[in-house]
Image (tube, rainbow, N blue to C red):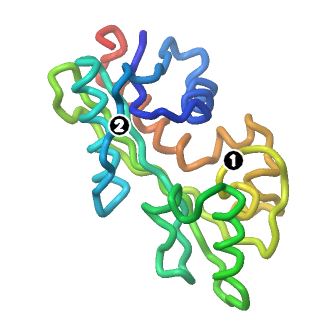
Amino acid sequence: MKIVLASSNEHKVKEINEIVAGTGLEFVLPPAGFDPVEDGNTFEENSLIKAREAWKLSKTWTLADDSGLCIDYLEGRPGIYSARYAETPQKRIERVLREMEGAGNRKAHFACAMTLINPDGNVEFAHTGICEGSITTEARGTNGFGYDPIFLVKNSSRTMAELSDDEKNHISHRSVALRAVLDYISEAHLAGNV
């Protein structure tokens, strides 16, 4: 059973398919032409924009997510601009570390808002997953992507980039949101319709 994942990010598709392994669900990229204008003010709004855009192209079950890093000291930045905070992943990390120099409060969280659209084009379910942590003073680890090397997982001595894929897939903001979606699909007995 396939669900269109409203993303052009193959890393995201791979990560989500690893999380749902064994459930009978498979996530696939949207048809050609997927290019939403993410002009919402929240993760939830951008998730809905992406879900609706992918649904217009596929007319089937569609799941979208919008996620990012929110840092207390930076008043929630980079937030919805996480992927556009600088030109490259490395420069984004460098910018955050530069802006965090001397910060006492290093608390942060990853957020992931997911929106499930049904074949009629209506929102079937929405949920936001959170992963709490803090920002390190230097990058550590080689696994993962994005801000993972500077995100120290709460109650852990390791950054997200120092976790195995399996460990990350149990605690990440994306897995928290996705588990809520999967629970909804299961409890609503939708799997046969997907």
Amino acid on which the number 2 mark rests in the picture:
Asp
In front: mark 1 or mark 2? 2
Amino acid on which the number 1 mark rests in the picture:
Phe
Q: Judge the density around disc 2: few (<14), some (14-19), many (≥20) Cα neighbours within 10 Å.
A: few
Q: How many marks?
A: 2
Q: Residue at x 65, y 52 (%)?
A: 146
Q: Residue at x 66, y 58 (%)?
A: 147
Q: Quadrant of residue 61?
A: top left
In front of the other: 163 or 55: 55
159 shown above or below 25:
below
Q: Secondary structure at mark 2?
A: loop
Mark 1 and mark 2: Cα distance apart in space: 22 Å
Mark 1 vs 2, N-terminal side:
2
Question: Tag on residue 145?
Answer: 1
Instruction: Please provide percent x and percent y for residue 155.
Output: 73, 64
Q: Judge the density around disc 1: few (<14), some (14-19), many (≥20) Cα neighbours within 10 Å.
A: few
Looking at the rendered image, the quarter that the C terminus falls into is top left
Instruction: Please provide percent x and percent y for residue 128.
Output: 40, 51
> In the visual, does 118 lie left or right of 64?
left
> In the visual, does 104 lie left or right of 114?
right
Looking at the rendered image, the quarter that the N terminus falls into is top left
Q: Quadrant of residue 143?
A: top right
Q: Quadrant of residue 20?
A: top right
Residue where numbered disc 2 is placed: 35
Q: Secondary structure at mark 1?
A: loop
Instruction: Please provide percent x and percent y for residue 83.
Output: 52, 55
Instruction: Please provide percent x and percent y for residue 187.
Output: 34, 25
6 shown above or below 80:
above
Question: Tag on residue 32?
Answer: none
> In the visual, does 15 lie left or right of 39?
right
Q: Residue at x 17, y 27 (%)?
A: 121
Q: Residue at x 84, y 53 (%)?
A: 141
